[in-house]
Amino acid sequence: MANTILVGAQWGDEGKGKIIDVLTGNADVVVRSQGGNNAGHTVIHGGKKFVLHLIPSGILRARKICVIGNGVVIDPIALVREIDVLRGLGVKAGKNLLISDCAHLVLPYHRALDEQRELRKGHVKIGTTKRGIGPAYGDKAARTGLRIADLMQPELFSKKLNAKMRENNSILKALGAKPISFAKVNADFLDAGERLKPFVANTVVYLHEALKAGKEILFEGAQGTFLDIDHGTYPYVTSSNTTAGGACTGSGVPPHRMDRVLGVMKAYTTRVGEGSLPTEDAELADMLHEMGREFGATTGRARRCGWFDAVATHYATMINGIDEIAITNLDGLDTVDPIKVCVGYKLDGKKLEVPPSDSAQLTRCEPVYEELPGWKRSTERVRKVSDLPKEARDYVNKIAEWTGARLTIISVGPSRGQTLIL
Ligand code: GDP
Ligand code: IMO
Ligand code: MG
């Protein structure tokens, strides 16, 4: 039985949702352990498009259990909405979904503060999803957050909420923003709490029982390695540990029970929001956008695009302990020739093999490229690795070699069937 941590090896949106959907066929339980509804994981299933934000992508498969772990920050209103949307599309969301009672809540003042802080930063803003993620994790670290367990106790919740709202409304007023009505938030949250009650559990206990019963667990990472609060391009990052360790702390499953780390990466690079992207290329971005690709699944923003950055993915392999890699969106390069890959950075005349820790230095890095020939043929209908054009096979093998892990999955389209398993 293999328990797998799936992580994004770039800046998010690597196609994690699609790969989770493929892997869930062989798993019993799918767990989200960090992030919140800043995530947008796309799965094409039965001809329909689903975008999951808080609920693990495994929900689309019958008889799989999905867990929202303690490390996730939950906006209960958004979660209830997501459950309703899924049910409206014919997806079961009942006993197959568990929510940790230790998960922290995202409240309307978190969203308002996120927005105000971004506004005040002006041109040095982070470019957040404005879902309140940073302020919610801030409260968690400051030990002043409210949790799902509080929401399950209406009287206690209202009391705690009242105190928090008084404090946050004074901050919002000082920032020139409108205060938020306690009565409305209280009523909306208690309603949402009632709706979520049947799902709430001690998920740590559940997961350990599942382990004892020999069940296979898949940990669905959100965001990507370079958005990690510790290892990413700080301060242009999110507020959780998006790297492999986050799966342990955010679920209560210990490191020695993890068997495999799978890094998901696009055949090129994208980023949404501010911060450096060393291989950014406007022409490549225009081409992908003209194909209707690379628009954010959560905010609809056009993603910035660049060439594959093997310095970044090699570093991601170190941090996460990536054993295996899945390369997605290979078909995005079907018409490109030649294809560039970044194999080093140059900073002040010196060649670097790992990204510098300082964002300002990273911005000054110049990529050192190698060029590989393109295949100039559609790969969307290819179902066997041996049927890929030789140049495409050489390309994926080269980027796996530079990244330093074993290539096990290649994706040539958004649907489950458009997947080559090695
Ligand atoms: P996630 O956040 O990592 O789950 O990725 P997103 O869902 O935000 O973005 C990935 C996008 O690429 C989505 O629109 C997917 O449907 C799409 N996608 C995933 N894999 C492939 C692929 O191999 N080819 C194509 N054309 N699209 C893909
Ligand atoms: P998935 O799981 C891509 C980015 C935002 C911003 C930064 C901080 O779909 O890969 P936040 O709202 O978290 O405070 O924003 O992180 N970001 C993502 N970028 N994919 C995501 O999730 C992201 N979640 C956050 O654009 O740059
Ligand atoms: Mg996404």
Image: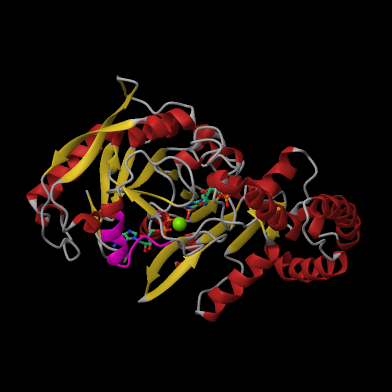
Residue 43 horizontal side relative to residue 422, left or right: right
Coordinates of residue 264 in the picture (x, y in percent): 36, 47
The reply, left or right, for residue 61 in relation to residue 154 is left
Identify the image quadrant of the N terminus: top left
Answer yes or no: is residue 173 visible. Answer: yes
Relative horizontal placement of residue 400, taking residue 151 as reference (left or right): left
Residue at 86%, 64% in the rendered image: 182
Which color mode does the image show?
secondary structure
Total numbered badges shown on the rendered structure: 0
Q: Quadrant of residue 154?
A: bottom right
Residue at 49% in and 46% down? 274
User: Magenta includes 93?
Assistant: no
Residue 62 visible in the shown view:
no
Residue positioned most to the front: 123
Magenta range is 285-295
Looking at the image, the residue that sits furthest to the top is 350
Q: Compared with residue 346, is residue 382 higher up or lower down, i.e. above or below? A: below
Q: Give the image location of residue 178, x and y in percent.
A: 79, 62
| Image point (38%, 71%), residue name | 45
Image coords of residue 380 (percent x, y): 20, 64
* Image quadrant assignment for residue 55: bottom right
Q: To which quarter of the image does residue 334 belong?
A: bottom left
Picture layout, residue 45 above or below residue 165? below
Image x and y of residue 408, in percent: 26, 45
Above or below residue 8? Residue 299 is below
Quick check: 28 left or right of 406? right
